[in-house]
């Protein structure tokens, strides 16, 4: 009993978080023996499930760490989850670009998201070290977010995919013998006694590295909301873990959120401004920040739905 009493609240939350992560990955990994496409109904239930898990974890943070960190977590999670919708649009384009069969989406997305989790964890931990040593870097993050938000707002263009320009794509094409086929769902193929790799293996690398590009914008946004390692790490990873279910949910609706880009751009600029004005010791309460983020994202989704319905 004394041993359990000596474990800190932070440590308990990390144990719970890692346990959820490991259990979900084991369950997913065990489903690969039957390549199949996730149904829309299953995507809905899994999306609801992951959001429920994330919200429940937010409640645990509230009980263990208090109201302020819980609100920071909710703000960061909501923002990361909304930003991850951009990933979905690009993931659809990448899978179409490489002509991947739908029955292999599950496997490719699983390992792509696994890679994204590893990359993001490394990126966040490095970011934490830098922020602790050089706190002024947060203001650089603020400027980056304002610039990124403005660039998204002004572009007004659908995302484009050019895998041939991707650094990981070039590296894998150069150092791995990639075959232009799916290898019946296997990553590794032996032909004439030689080890070769299917196109699925290449796509996993492209998906993981593409998410890292998005993380360059989204992780600084999370740092602008909170510098608590637990908050930044768990909000990011929970958002990424729900990506695959969200992919199947939104796969047929990539063109139905006309104003989502604008909503995301306003959120990024708001978070950047919130960070910068703290130079003058002006602080926007976390409760108000969360409300503003919800209004911006909710309005963009509502306007998109209204526009889609008006077209029918």
Image: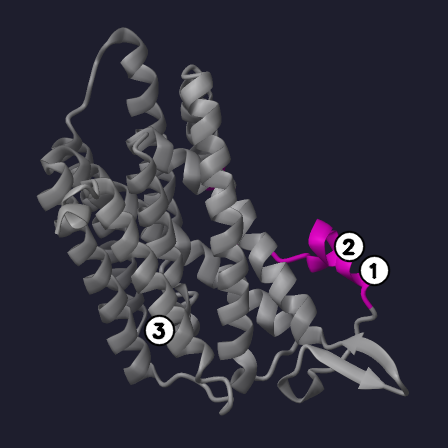
Residue 249, label in figure: 3
Label 2 CA crowd tier, 10 Å (few <14, some 14–19, many 20+): few
Which residue is the site of mark 1? Answer: 175
Residue 166 visible, this orientation: no
| Numbered disc 2: secondary structure | helix
Residue 155 among those drawn in magenta = yes
Label 1 environment density (alpha carbons within 10 Å; few <14, some 14–19, many ≥20): few
Up-down relation of residue 31 to residue 149 (above or below): below
Decide: is 137 above or below 24: above
Q: Please say whether residue 174 is visible from this viewpoint.
A: yes
How far apart, in angstroms, are the residues tagged by discs 1 and 2?
6 Å
**How is the model colour-coded?**
one colour
**Residue that extends furthest to the bottom in the rendered view of this protein:** 34
Which one is in front, 227 or 86? 227
- Residue 149 is situated, as x and y percent measured from the top left of the image, at 42, 35
Residue at x-position 40% and y-position 83% = 38
Q: Residue 1's spot in the image, x, y percent?
A: 12, 52
Residue 198 lies in quadrant: bottom right
Asked if residue 230 lies in the magenta stretch, the reply is no
The residue beneath circle 2 is 171
Q: Earlier in the sequence, mark 3 or mark 2?
A: 2
Give the structural element (helix, strand or loop) at label 1.
helix
The magenta segment:
151-176
Q: Position of residue 251 (x, y in %)?
A: 43, 73
Q: CA distance from mark 3 to mark 2?
A: 32 Å
- As measured in the structure, the alpha-carbon distance from the residue carrying label 3 to the one carrying label 1 is 35 Å
* Residue at the (19%, 63%) spot, across then down: 52
Q: Image check: 193 left or right of 284?
A: right
Report the residue that reaches farthest toward the front: 2
**Which element carries disc 3, helix, strand or loop?**
helix
| Mark 3 crowd level (few <14, some 14–19, many ≥20, 10 Å Cα) | many
């Amino acid at each position: 009993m004394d041993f359990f009493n000596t474990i800190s609240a932070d440590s308990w939350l990390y144990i719970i978080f890692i346990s959820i992560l490991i259990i979900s990955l084991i369950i997913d990994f065990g489903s690969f023996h039957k390549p199949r496409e996730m149904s829309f109904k299953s995507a809905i239930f899994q999306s609801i499930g992951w959001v429920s898990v994330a919200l429940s974890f937010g409640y645990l943070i509230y009980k263990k760490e208090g109201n302020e960190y819980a609100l920071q977590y909710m703000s960061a999670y909501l923002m990361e989850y909304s930003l991850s919708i951009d990933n979905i649009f690009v993931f659809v384009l990448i899978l179409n670009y490489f002509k991947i069969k739908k029955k292999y989406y599950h496997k490719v997305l699983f390992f792509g998201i696994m890679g994204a989790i590893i990359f993001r964890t490394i990126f966040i931990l490095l970011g934490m070290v830098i922020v602790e040593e050089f706190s002024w870097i947060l203001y650089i993050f603020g400027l980056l977010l304002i610039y990124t938000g403005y660039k998204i707002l002004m572009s007004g263009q659908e995302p484009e995919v050019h895998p041939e320009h991707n650094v990981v794509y070039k590296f894998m094409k150069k150092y791995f013998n990639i075959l232009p086929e799916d290898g019946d769902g296997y990553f590794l193929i032996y032909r004439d006694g030689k080890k070769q790799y299917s196109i699925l293996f290449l796509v996993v690398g492209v998906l993981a590295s593409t998410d890292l590009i998005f993380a360059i914008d989204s992780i600084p946004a999370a740092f602008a909301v909170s510098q608590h390692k637990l908050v930044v790490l768990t909000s990011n990873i929970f958002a990424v873990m729900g990506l695959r279910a969200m992919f199947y949910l939104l796969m047929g609706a990539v063109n139905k959120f006309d104003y989502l880009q604008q909503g995301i751009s306003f959120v990024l600029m708001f978070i950047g401004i919130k960070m910068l004005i703290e130079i003058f010791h002006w602080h926007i309460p976390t409760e108000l920040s969360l409300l503003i983020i919800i209004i911006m994202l909710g309005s963009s989704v509502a306007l998109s739905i209204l526009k889609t319905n008006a077209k029918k």
